[in-house]
Image (cartoon, grey):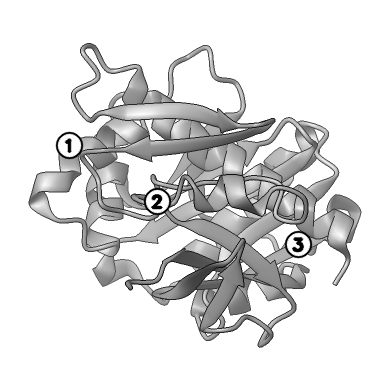
Amino acid sequence: MDIDRALAIEAAEREYLQSRVENLLGVDGNPFGARVFHNGSFPCFAVSASPSPMFNRVYGDYQHDAAAIVGLLSQSVTPLIAAPASLEQGVCLAGRQLERLKGWTHLQLACAVEHAVIDQHAFAIEEVSAETLPAFLDIHAAGFHTKAEQRLLNRASFSYPASNQRARIYVLKSAGEVVAGAVLYLASNGVAYLGTAATQKSARGLGYHGALINHRIEQAKLHGSRLIAATALANSQSRRNLQRAGLTVSHAQALYRLAED
């Protein structure tokens, strides 16, 4: 595992997730109880209205100050990385036992921009607008089985202000209707992170996800990114589509929480 590349990928993902929490924090009155705080130089975030590990994460210096991470884990999780198949179900950190969350172990994939493989397609892809954002949000909520009570929060987390030039949402249309969409986050460290993507259930298997990968890679090139990165489940079609575009497995990431006594 190339540790420098792995850390760059993790930093880009962290920045992307933090940006979504900051969107929640920006809602008048902060109704979702969002907050961003720091553990030393590492940003962490939490959202009291959401139980999702996506929005409640602690980061820090795992080698030199693991106790500080453990001290913040009462309501949050922390990601640990390793070579694939090397992550344990339980680990000891600063004298406390942590357990791996079921369903939250993913592969991190990446490639240098110049090594990406872009296939041509004839699909209509455009940057999201005020008119098409609701369709993307509906497709995303359906694809990720977002509960009704969490849909307003989920929508707000994607409402990037115009001042945020790092986040891009693209939608793919068929017969004038939005059928798929995906996020590109241009992280400050030069990594283009291919964020969440979703396709309408009735439109799956038609190559839309792959086309959105290609489009985002093209956009990343235009914006001067040096590395393309993405997250996928090991046995998913998303992983296969990403590998088709030239990305290879960098490492595995799993989320851990404090084990119950």
Amino acid under label 2? Ser
Q: Position of residue 129 (x, y in %)?
A: 38, 26
Residue at point 17% right, 36% down?
A: 152
- The answer to whether any part of residue 168 appears in the image is yes
Q: Nearer the viewer, mark 2 or mark 3?
A: 2
| Label 2, residues with CA under 10 Å away: few <14, some 14-19, many ≥20 | many
Q: Position of residue 126 (x, y in %)?
A: 49, 37
Q: Position of residue 136 (x, y in %)?
A: 31, 44
Residue of label 3: 110
Q: Is residue 5 above or below residue 203?
A: above
Q: Position of residue 248 (x, y in %)?
A: 77, 73
| Label 1, residues with CA under 10 Å away: few <14, some 14-19, many ≥20 | few
Amino acid under label 3? Ala
Q: Is residue 188 above or below residue 61?
A: above
Q: Earlier in the sequence, mark 2 or mark 3?
A: 2
Q: Is residue 23 above or below residue 245?
A: above
Query: How many numbered tags mark residues here?
Result: 3
Instruction: State the residue in front, 69 or 226.
Output: 69
Q: Nearer the viewer, mark 1 or mark 2?
A: 2
Quarter assignment of residue 106:
bottom right
Q: Marks 3 and 2: in contact by CB < 8 Å?
A: no
Direction from residue 239 to residue 77 in the image, left or right = left
SS category of the residue bearing label 2: loop
Kindly identify which numbered label has been placed on residue 82. Answer: none
Q: Which part of the image, by quadrant, shows the C terminus? A: bottom left
SS category of the residue bearing label 1: helix
Amino acid under label 1? Leu
Residue of label 1: 152
Instruction: State the residue in front, 117 or 22.
Output: 22
Residue of label 2: 76
- Report, in whole angstroms, how far the alpha carbon at label 3 lies from the one at label 1: 32 Å
Q: Is residue 148 above or below residue 203?
A: above
